[in-house]
């Protein structure tokens, strides 16, 4: 009986700590589902990439060339900017801090942003701490 109570209390304490703060700023252009993603596939990042692939996104890990142009001389005026081969960029910062009991996947602290490369604005952000599988489900709803 004490063992069962301990398990229930432990699961309740993990659930009480979960939170996701979602901000939706713009709509995704469904005719331009291409995104620059970070390199790698472990942990939460792997789940996010699987979600993008299953929702028809074209992924690239190369953003494009960095350009410096302008004039040099008495009044030097140079501009530096990046180019993109995709419409959107996915920025992901996360740290797995535990394992979720019910699916044995990661429990992470995370900060995710989808950025529109044409306008330079954020489309949506998700930040907080939760089971990776729950974060991926929420992300999946946003990128459909």
Image (cartoon, rainbow, N blue to C red):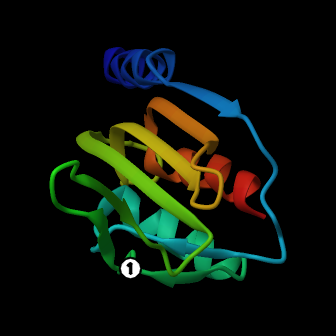
Which residue occupies the foreground of this view, 26 or 55?
Answer: 26
Tell whether 79 sits left or right of 32: left
| Secondary element type, mark 1 | loop
Tell whether 107 sits left or right of 36: left
Tell whether 55 sits left or right of 72: right
Instruction: Name the spot of residue 88 as percent of width and height, x first.
Output: 58, 64
Instruction: Name the spot of residue 105 as percent of width and height, x first.
Output: 37, 54
Q: Quadrant of residue 81?
A: bottom left
Question: Quadrant of the image for the N terminus?
Answer: top left
Q: Which residue is mark 1?
A: 64
Please tell me whether residue 108 is drawn above or below residue 52 in the rendered image: above
Question: Quadrant of the image for the C terminus?
Answer: bottom right
Q: How many marks?
A: 1
Q: Quadrant of residue 13?
A: top left
Instruction: Name the spot of residue 100 as percent of width and height, x first.
Output: 38, 42
Residue at left offset 64%, top offset 31%: 22
Q: Quadrant of residue 33?
A: bottom right
Instruction: Name the spot of residue 69 as percent of width and height, x first.
Output: 32, 68
Residue at left offset 57%, top offset 45%: 134
Residue at left offset 36%, top offset 54%: 104
């Amino acid at each position: 009986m004490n063992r069962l109570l301990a398990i229930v209390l432990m699961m309740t304490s993990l659930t009480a700590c979960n939170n996701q703060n979602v901000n939706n700023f713009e709509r995704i252009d469904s005719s331009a589902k291409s995104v620059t993603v970070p390199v790698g596939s472990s942990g939460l990042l792997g789940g996010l990439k699987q979600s993008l692939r299953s929702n028809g996104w074209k992924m690239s890990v190369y953003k494009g060339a960095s350009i410096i142009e302008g004039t040099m001389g008495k009044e030097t005026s140079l501009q530096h900017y990046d180019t993109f081969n995709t419409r959107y960029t996915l920025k992901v910062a996360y740290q797995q801090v535990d394992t979720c009991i019910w699916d044995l996947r990661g429990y992470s602290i995370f900060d995710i942003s989808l950025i529109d490369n044409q306008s330079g604005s954020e489309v949506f952000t998700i930040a907080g701490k939760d089971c990776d599988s729950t974060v991926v489900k929420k992300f999946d709803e946003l990128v459909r």
